[in-house]
Amino acid sequence: MKPSDKTKGTKIEKMTEVMLANPVKRRSFLKGLGVVAAAAAAPLGAAKAISDKAEESSFWETFFQKHYKEMSAEDKLKVFARIERETKASHGVEVKVQDPQAIPGVKYAYALNLSRCNGSRRCVTACVRENNQSRHEPEIQYIKVIEMPRGTMDPENGNLYYQGESVPNEGKFYLPVQCNQCNNPPCTKVCPVEATWKESSDGLVVVDYDWCIGCRYCQAACPYEARHFNFAKPNITAEEINPNQSYLSNRLRPKGVMEKCTFCLHRTRNGKNPACHDACPTGARKFGNIMDPESEISKILKEKRVFVLKEELNTMPQFFYYFD
Amino acid sequence: MILRSYALFWMRMIQYAAVGSVKFYLWILFLLALIIPGIAAYYYQFTHGLIVTNLSDQVSWGAYIANFTFLVGVAAGAVLLVVPAYVYHHKPTKDIVIVGELLAVAAIVMCLLFILADMGRPDRFTHVLPILGRLNFPRSVLAWDVIVLNGYLFLNLHVSGYLLFMKYLGRTPNKLIYLPIVFISIFWAASIHTVTAFLYSGLGGRPFWNTAILAPRFLISAFAGGPAILTIAFRSIKSCTKLNVEEGVFDLLKKIVAITMPINLFLLGCELFKEFYTDSTHVASAKYLYFGLHGAHMLTPYIWSAIAMDLIAMIIFVTPRLRSDNRIFIFGSVLAILGIWTEKGMGLIIPGFIPSPLGDIVEYTPSIVEFFVCLGIWSLGGLIFTLLAKVAIGVLTGDLKENSSISSQH
Ligand code: SF4
């Protein structure tokens, strides 16, 4: 069959079908199109032509992909299979992309004991490993540890770039900051396309990386610098990839989209603790379900004098700090 | 029948736009020479990602959004001709108001291009469309901005397109078809700049922007910079084309800036007072902008030159002897444009990110790629306005009408 005969004057949907069935021949196919159809498809074709080999076959698939909340179970399976296929093609790694759902009756909160934290940044490295962040250009880290002088609680007085060898330094304390999973999140409110939202039952703030248009408004809105942008295609080697992935958290991100801490959704929704929690050498991090009055986190919130960052902004963080 | 002459109207407009004098071709060539590197730079950005800009997680927005913000003001500024023309029937303005509306069209197109250039995933533009997308309306102010900007583009195209077509046919336009739209567009003009200000002022985590005065400041700076641009546009139209732009138009624009420019500076002063007299921790961004912070002071020379330019422009605009001299007035207009562009573009967007909410100081100047993309978009806007204005002037002067052959010297 000659593609030009079959597709003359058809709509983009039809073109997609042909392209999906025949991904390798796409370029010759484009040539064979009628002038009008080619002109109409030109910007899209150009967009596609420049993306990587691995992404090539799936450009149209993602172009018509629906918003996460609108996908049927079947749609999701197809999308997850595509991501697995792409990672295989780009890095040669077999990964499993899943979609763990919120556990009923669970709402997460985090508490961090500032008297214990020694500024070793173990949480930072564990987080990067767990969540498949881009290692360099751009270097993305969800947790920032600020070295604070005594006598202030304003992070603006701290130092983000302290040397890690000598910690803890005399007269300093350490303030790790990551996504606060706010109950009143400024980031989700501003997103023009609902690409980011707060999950209603367990309270995690997530991003649909395949829906985000990369406008970075959420980044401007976040008062905790918790949102990180993929200024380029993430740089991660095959050995560095954590194959245990989920769609809304640590699967490989495309270029040009926002990402953030999800309290390791793929771990916590499977009953585990976030990677940063398990990596902490001092036991400063406490994580759990605040709907369960017997949980350690509930007790801490009840008994310790906990506080949150930038309380005056009314973001209602679910990430608490305390000294003891 | 009407459809046929409408199709013919389009054909002849395109034909008319393509034929001109040597001067015209040179101007077009000059613009193209700037547009082509812009396209190349954008292609480079598109393939490599926004990493080729100097933007960062700390300074999320830069030159693109700064230019966007300024151009929304230019688009809104056109209303300063629309109100006297349609509401007060000011004859000299009425004759040329269409050209002003077309300037707004070109400005909005540039705005949309700057937004597109800023997007990490321009290929997902469909996500803001109805049905295909999922516009977060009414919660996201950016969703509002998408609607008001596109709406304003449509309103201006409708009015100017309809009036030009009628003029071309030699018929009197039906008031019912365009006047209601004109009145809507007047309010709409205020809305585009208000919504754009709300984009920034609605963010509690950015104290530098989180101020109620931002929307009034935006509007008044648009009404100061807008007439300056209109003055320059109409002076060049008057000297290069057959269109008779009466002095009444320029007098009107002069009267406007004599009021708006001082108010613009007054509001800036209010802002400065609040920041520096209060002297809370929130003054950090303003300190960075005006005096530098912890040794970082990339923007200070720009903001002080902007204020100097604003001040000189204001003196020219309010002093009768100076502003009555056309050359001096044009000089003042250029200063006003440059001053407002700096103060409200770079001087507003970038310090909002410095220091970052966690106290990080990361500075920003546009990269070479950003520079060429910006230049390309400005030139493309210039090209669009040139062609639109050429056709409109052809119709207005009677060069281009039904039952006539094309005679284009300009
Ligand atoms: S960058 Fe993505 S998630 Fe953030 S506001 Fe824009 S579209 Fe939404």
Image (tube, coloured by chain):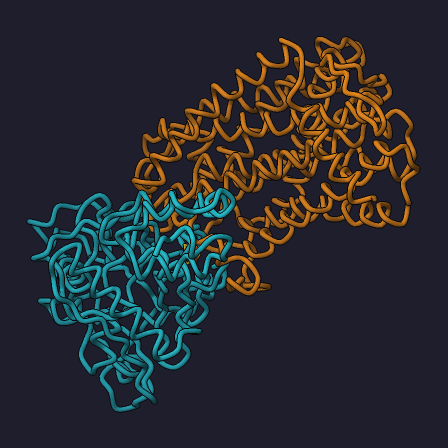
Chain colours: A cyan, B orange
Q: Quadrant of residue B41?
A: top left
Q: Is residue B154 above or below residue B104?
A: below
Pick the residue in front: B121 or B20: B20
Quadrant of the rendered image holding ligand 1: bottom left
Pick the residue in front: A184 or A167: A184
Q: Would you say residue B342 is visible in this rendering?
A: yes
- Residue B239: image x %, image y %? 74, 11
Q: Is residue B278 above or below residue B106?
A: below
The quarter of the picture where the C terminus of chain B appears is top right
Q: Is residue A317 above or below residue B242?
A: below
Give left or right: position of B227 versus B208: right
Q: Quadrant of residue B229?
A: top right
The quarter of the picture where the N terminus of chain B appears is top right
- Residue A51: image x %, image y %? 29, 47
Q: Would you say residue A263 is visible in this rendering?
A: no
- Residue A151: image x %, image y %? 29, 54
Pick the residue in front: B343 or B38: B38
- Residue B238: image x %, image y %? 76, 15
Q: Residue at x 27, y 59 (%)?
A: A177
Give left or right: position of B122 versus B182: left
Give left or right: position of B223 versus A37: right
Q: Residue at x 75, y 35 (%)?
A: B8
Give left or right: position of B78 versus B136: right
Q: Is residue B7 above or below residue A190?
A: above
